[in-house]
């Protein structure tokens, strides 16, 4: 069934609001981001903004869910690859997109944001789905002999998350901004080397 013009416009506005939310959070952080500033940036009234997202928490949960949906869409395109290659593709895509968009997923994992995401059913569902997918790929890669079975899975999952959410750390480094593709390649290579059997 196709969407009506009104539904398409509503979806476009919603996407524009979520994109502006992502940008504002990257610039100011969650606490300093105001709904008033967001409405002004998008060019809508506050009532229009609140009609789309009744609270700031709903807005951030929707933004995080959209990011996770996009990640799963990228992962789905790699279904024919080996478990390790799918895991590495997920890591590569996460790092590259953050550098290209000059954003940081780390903000989404701050305790107050994570608590907010866990309270919203849809974002909680996606958080669990991401974790289940990552853990399953790691177990599949171990079973396929692609990852050393002596590696602690719980620790490996935490290292994977740390690498995937932190490419924007060091923005003020004297080395300057990295090339998105090269940084993603480097992170993936370092992670891959750590998984090899001694």
Image: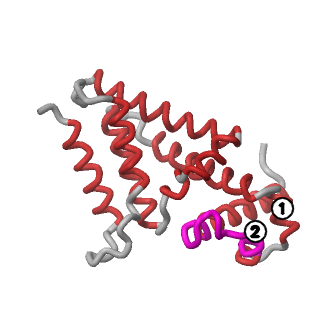
Find residue 155 and report its image quarter: top left
Q: What is the magenta range?
A: 24-39
Residue 108 horizontal side relative to residue 16, left or right: left
Residue furthest to the left in view is 198
Task: Name which of mark 2 and mark 1 comes first in the sequence.
Answer: 2
Q: Residue at x 11, y 33 (%)?
A: 198
Give SS at disc 1: helix
Figure coloring:
secondary structure
Q: Position of residue 176 (x, y in %)?
A: 31, 77
Which secondary structure class fits the magenta region best?
helix
What residue does disc 2 label?
Answer: 35
Choose between 174 and 6: the one closer to the eye: 174
Find residue 52 and report its image quarter: bottom right
Inspect the magenta stretch and tell me whether residue 165 lies in it.
Answer: no
Dot 1 crowding, Cα within 10 Å, few <14, some 14–19, many 20+: some
Residue 167 horizontal side relative to residue 22, left or right: left
Q: Position of residue 21 (x, y in %)?
A: 65, 65
Q: Are marks 2 and 1 in contact (CB under 8 Å)?
A: yes
Residue 167 horizontal side relative to residue 101, left or right: left
Q: Position of residue 7 (x, y in %)?
A: 82, 55
Give SS at disc 2: helix
Choose between 18 and 117: the one closer to the eye: 117
What residue does disc 1 label?
Answer: 50
Of badges 2 and 1, the one in the foreground is 2
Q: Residue at x 67, y 61 (%)?
A: 18
State how far apart marks 2 and 1 are (Cα): 9 Å
Q: Residue at x 49, y 56 (%)?
A: 105
Query: On screen, 190 above or below 44?
Result: above
Dot 2 crowding, Cα within 10 Å, few <14, some 14–19, many 20+: some
């Amino acid at each position: 069934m196709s969407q009506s013009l009104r539904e398409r416009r509503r979806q476009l506005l919603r996407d524009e609001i979520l994109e502006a939310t992502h940008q504002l959070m990257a610039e100011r952080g969650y606490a300093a981001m105001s709904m008033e500033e967001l409405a002004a940036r998008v060019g809508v009234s506050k009532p229009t903004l609140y009609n789309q997202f009744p609270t700031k928490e709903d807005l951030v949960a929707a933004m995080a869910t959209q990011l996770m949906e996009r990640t799963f869409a990228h992962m789905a395109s790699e279904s024919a690859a080996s478990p390790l290659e799918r895991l590495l593709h997920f890591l590569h895509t996460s790092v590259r997109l953050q550098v290209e968009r000059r954003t940081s997923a780390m903000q989404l994992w701050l305790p107050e944001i994570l608590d907010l995401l866990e309270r919203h059913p849809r974002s909680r569902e996606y958080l669990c789905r991401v974790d289940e997918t990552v853990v399953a790929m790691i177990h599949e890669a171990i079973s396929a002999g692609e990852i050393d079975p002596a590696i602690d899975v719980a620790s490996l999952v935490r290292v994977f998350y740390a690498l995937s959410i932190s490419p924007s750390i060091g923005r003020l480094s004297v080395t300057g901004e990295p090339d998105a593709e090269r940084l993603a390649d480097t992170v993936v290579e370092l992670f891959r080397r750590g998984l090899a059997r001694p």
